[in-house]
Image: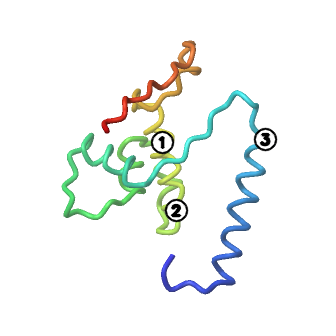
């Protein structure tokens, strides 16, 4: 993160590591944790709801549109993280390409290596 001091970046790294460790301890061993870039799931919802690139991505508004029962939890501006969390969960459910094969009852397939072009 540009413009941040060394001390604050170190603190962020420690907090992120603590969160990863707590998550690893809390979840069963067979649960797969997947990190996804915001652009990936935001673009999914842009295409799904036909939101142009020029329009700002408002996760609270989009989550309230997809999940009307969640509207009371998304009224304040500082609820944007709640909107992000709801959209991430919806993205995981709606996007079958990212569903882990174990959750579908299938055995995981091994990735095949591409032959090297020398």
Q: Quadrant of the C terminus?
A: top left
Q: Quadrant of residue 18?
A: bottom right
Count of number-bearing discs: 3
Tell me the element at label 2.
helix
Question: Quick one: 103 or 70, which is closer to the camera?
Answer: 103
Mark 2 sits on what residue?
79
> Taking 10 as reference, is 26 left or right?
right
Q: Earlier in the sequence, mark 1 or mark 3?
A: 3
Q: Position of residue 9 (x, y in %)?
A: 63, 77
Picture coordinates of residue 86 (x, y %)?
50, 46
Foreground: disc 2 or disc 1? 2
Between circles 1 and 3, the one closer to the viewer is 3
Tell me the SS state at disc 3: helix
**Foreground label between 2 and 3:** 3
Q: Earlier in the sequence, mark 2 or mark 3?
A: 3
Q: Tell me whether circle 2 and circle 3 mark residues in contact (CB < 8 Å).
A: no
C-alpha distance separating marks 2 and 1: 15 Å
Compared to 7, does 108 lie above or below?
Answer: above
Residue at image location 76% in from the left, 31% down from the top: 28
Could you tell me which residue is drawn at 73 percent across and 67 percent down?
14
Which quarter of the picture shows residue 60?
bottom left
* Mark nearer the N terminus (2 vs 1): 1
Which residue has dot 1 on it?
69
Disc 3 marks which residue?
26
Residue 28, placed above or below residue 39: above
Could you say which is closer to the camera, residue 62 or residue 99? 99
């Amino acid at each position: 993160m540009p413009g941040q001091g060394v001390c604050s970046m170190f603190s962020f790294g420690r907090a992120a590591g603590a969160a990863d460790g707590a998550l690893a301890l809390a979840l069963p061993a067979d649960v797969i944790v997947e990190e996804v870039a915001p652009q990936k799931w935001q673009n999914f919802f842009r295409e799904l709801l036909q939101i142009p690139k020029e329009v700002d991505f408002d996760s609270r508004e989009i989550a309230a549109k997809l999940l009307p029962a969640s509207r009371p939890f998304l009224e304040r501006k500082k609820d944007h993280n709640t909107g992000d969390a709801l959209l991430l969960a919806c993205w995981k459910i709606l996007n079958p390409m990212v569903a882990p094969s174990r959750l579908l009852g299938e055995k995981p397939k091994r990735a095949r290596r591409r032959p090297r072009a020398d």
